[in-house]
Image (spheres, helix red, strand yellow):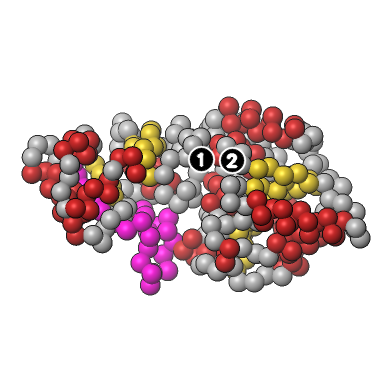
């Protein structure tokens, strides 16, 4: 997600180009048609690891020579890999080559978005947008409406507030305690609010525990309205998040996804540096070990200060809110 501004800058610099991304493809094709990326190919299926021998097999060399420009945010520290790509020009047509790390240097305070854009400086690129943006399709919006209707949610009610919570992350050390999420849900609960628990493939245990904590609190408090959205296709999840009035999550890909579609985000950075890895756009970040009251107060501020008069309609209308300044 943090590469999107760099990819957008490439698309502006080369408006007639087809951008192909080698990486880990989403099974539901999140980037294709919703970003400057024309096609995503599996880096494993491509066999790019073979370049680490220092020589390129002919099939891989022929494939790479089909490009005018190769930007490799991969293998920058390996001399054999760099040599293999540099040798593309020794026989036949040679693409222009840029090789750099995908991460800012450990000692650098630079945000990953700004760092990735800086690696493209030799191309004379200018960055008009430094916040990752996805342009959702009409089919994504239609799928989101179907999903929400299964929970009895109609987004046409102007007074209604939909709050998404994702308790997971790529590492447990980056996760705010689940018990606090349960406490937060009850602290934020109002008759006009509905809570949507986002569950990815690795989040089942966390969500189960969160529901257990909520059930324990329900015995002494009014039960909040909540539902569990598990393993939704990423384009559909993105469109659901675009309809949320607030998203609360840890340092995770889902948090960046929510920010990329314009959802007001409260991000909890427990173990990582948001100056380097934080979401951009309509994002509000708490660092360290915030209390439930700290998070509740910020969430209430965002809900009160954000203008929710806009709704997502098409692939060209990326956001549905105007963030508080």
Instruction: Examine the structure image and report whether residue 96 is included in the region drawn in magenta.
Output: yes
Residue at (70% x, 62% y) in the render = 178
Q: Is residue 208 left or right of residue 259?
A: right
First reached walking from the N terminus: tag 1 or tag 2: 1
Of the 4 image quadrants, the one containing the C terminus is: bottom right
Residues at circles 1 and 2 in contact by the CB criterion of under 8 Å: yes
Quadrant hosting residue 138: top right
Q: Which mark is residue 238?
A: 2
Magenta region, residue range: 95-117
Depth check: 49 or 18 in front?
49
Residue 144, horizontal then vertical, whole percent: 65, 33
Compared with residue 289, is residue 54 higher up or lower down, i.e. above or below?
above
User: How many residues crowd mark 2 within 10 Å: few (<14), some (14–19), many (20+)?
Assistant: many
Can the viewer see residue 123?
Answer: no
**Residue 56 magenta-highlighted:** no
What residue does disc 1 label? Answer: 134
Disc 2 on helix, strand or loop? helix
Badge 1 local density, few (<14 within 10 Å), some, or many (20+)? many
Identify whether 139 is placed above or below 251.
above
- Point 66% across, 47% down: residue: 198
Instruction: Left or right? Give the position of 69 relative to 233.
Output: left
């Amino acid at each position: 997600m943090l590469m999107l501004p760099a990819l957008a800058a490439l698309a502006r610099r080369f408006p007639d180009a087809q951008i192909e991304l080698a990486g880990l493809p989403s099974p539901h094709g999140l980037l294709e048609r919703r970003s400057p990326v024309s096609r995503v190919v599996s880096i494993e299926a491509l066999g790019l690891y073979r370049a680490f021998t220092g020589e390129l097999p002919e099939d891989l060399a022929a494939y790479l020579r089909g490009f005018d420009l190769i930007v490799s945010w991969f293998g920058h520290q390996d001399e054999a890999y760099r040599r293999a790509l540099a040798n593309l020009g020794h026989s036949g047509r040679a693409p222009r080559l840029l090789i750099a790390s995908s991460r800012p240097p450990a000692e650098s305070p630079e945000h990953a978005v700004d760092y990735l854009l800086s690696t493209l400086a030799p191309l004379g690129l200018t960055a008009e947008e430094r916040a990752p943006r996805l342009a959702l399709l009409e089919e994504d919006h239609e799928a989101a409406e179907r999903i929400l209707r299964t929970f009895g949610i109609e987004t046409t009610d102007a007074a209604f507030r939909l709050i998404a919570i994702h308790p997971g992350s790529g590492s447990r050390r980056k996760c705010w305690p689940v018990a606090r999420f349960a406490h937060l849900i009850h602290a934020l609960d109002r008759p006009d609010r509905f809570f949507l628990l986002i569950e990815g493939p690795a989040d089942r245990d966390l969500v189960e525990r969160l529901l257990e904590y909520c059930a324990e609190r329900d015995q002494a408090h009014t039960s909040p309205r909540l539902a569990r959205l598990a393993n939704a296709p990423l384009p559909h999840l993105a469109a659901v998040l675009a309809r949320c009035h607030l998203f609360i999550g840890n340092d995770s890909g889902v948090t960046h996804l929510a920010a990329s579609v314009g959802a007001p985000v409260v991000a909890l950075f427990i173990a990582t540096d948001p100056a380097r890895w934080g979401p951009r756009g309509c994002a509000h970040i708490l660092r360290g070990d915030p209390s439930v009251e700290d998070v509740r107060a910020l969430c209430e501020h965002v809900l009160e200060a954000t203008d929710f008069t806009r709704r997502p309609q098409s692939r060209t209308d990326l956001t549905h809110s105007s963030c508080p300044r």
